[in-house]
């Protein structure tokens, strides 16, 4: 009891913890980790005292930018992003929702101009009732994040 399964510690890199269960794969796509050569350890559906189930991502020798941390917050608003140096947490980047997200999500509105023309999607981000909502800059419709697909 009380023992949580953990993935191996890393020497240098980034650990993203407290990702909602199942969202880590989206973050892998978001950060283009499958096309890059960094070593990635993925923990899916691990036990968490605060969340029930959670995902963890450990990326060796890769340090996230503030912009990447903000994009991650769209999928994991309560994530803890730790920068690791010499096996120690050297800094924490708060997962803060960005005001806008560009490109990473598709507008579900079939009549939206972003469906007809090859332009990047753009949404303003709002959080209410613990859910993330995105308002399309082009068609002005509002969607819950969970009903949207990623374009990545
Ligand atoms: Zn739209």
Image (spheres, rainbow, N blue to C red):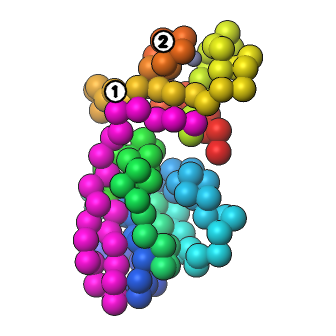
At horizontal 34% and vertical 45% (from top left) the residue drawn is 77
Vertical placement of 139 versus 33: above or below?
Answer: above
Which image quadrant: the C terminus?
Answer: top right
Vertical placement of 33 versus 131: above or below?
Answer: below
Determine which of the numbered discs, if any, sits on residue 126 in the image.
Answer: 1
Look at mark 2 in the image and give the residue it sits on.
Answer: 140
Q: From the top left corner, tell me how far across and down residue 2 is, in percent.
A: 29, 74
Label whose residue precedes the other's in the sequence (1 or 2):
1
Is 90 situated left or right of 148 in this image? left
Vertical placement of 44 versus 8: above or below?
Answer: above
At horizontal 41% and vertical 88% (from top left) the residue drawn is 11
Q: Is residue 34 visible?
A: yes
- SS at badge 1: strand
Vertical placement of 96 versus 85: above or below?
Answer: above
At horizontal 26% and vertical 66% (from top left) the residue drawn is 92
Q: From the top left corner, tell me how far across and down residue 133 is, in percent.
A: 41, 26
Q: Foreground: 147 or 126?
A: 126
Is the residue at mark 2 in contact range of ligand 1, meaning its CB lies under 8 Å from it?
Answer: yes
Q: Magenta residues, as a range?
A: 81-103
Give the class, few, some or many, for how many residues have Cα within 10 Å of label 2's Cα (few <14, many ≥20).
few
- SS at badge 2: loop
Determine which of the numbered discs, if any, sits on residue 93 in the image.
Answer: none
């Amino acid at each position: 009891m009380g023992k949580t399964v953990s993935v191996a510690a890393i020497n240098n890199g980034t650990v993203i913890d407290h990702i909602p269960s199942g969202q880590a794969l989206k973050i892998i796509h978001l950060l283009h980790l499958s096309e890059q050569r960094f070593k990635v350890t993925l923990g899916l559906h691990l036990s968490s005292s605060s969340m029930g189930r959670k995902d963890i991502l450990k990326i060796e020798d890769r340090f996230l930018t503030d912009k990447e941390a903000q994009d991650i917050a769209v999928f994991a608003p309560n994530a803890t992003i730790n920068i690791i140096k010499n096996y120690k947490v050297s800094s924490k980047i708060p997962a803060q929702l960005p005001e806008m997200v560009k490109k990473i999500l598709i507008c579900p509105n079939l009549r939206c101009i972003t469906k007809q023309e090859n332009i990047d999607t753009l949404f303003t981000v709002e959080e209410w009732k613990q859910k993330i909502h995105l308002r399309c800059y082009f068609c002005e419709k509002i969607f819950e994040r969970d009903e949207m697909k990623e374009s990545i």
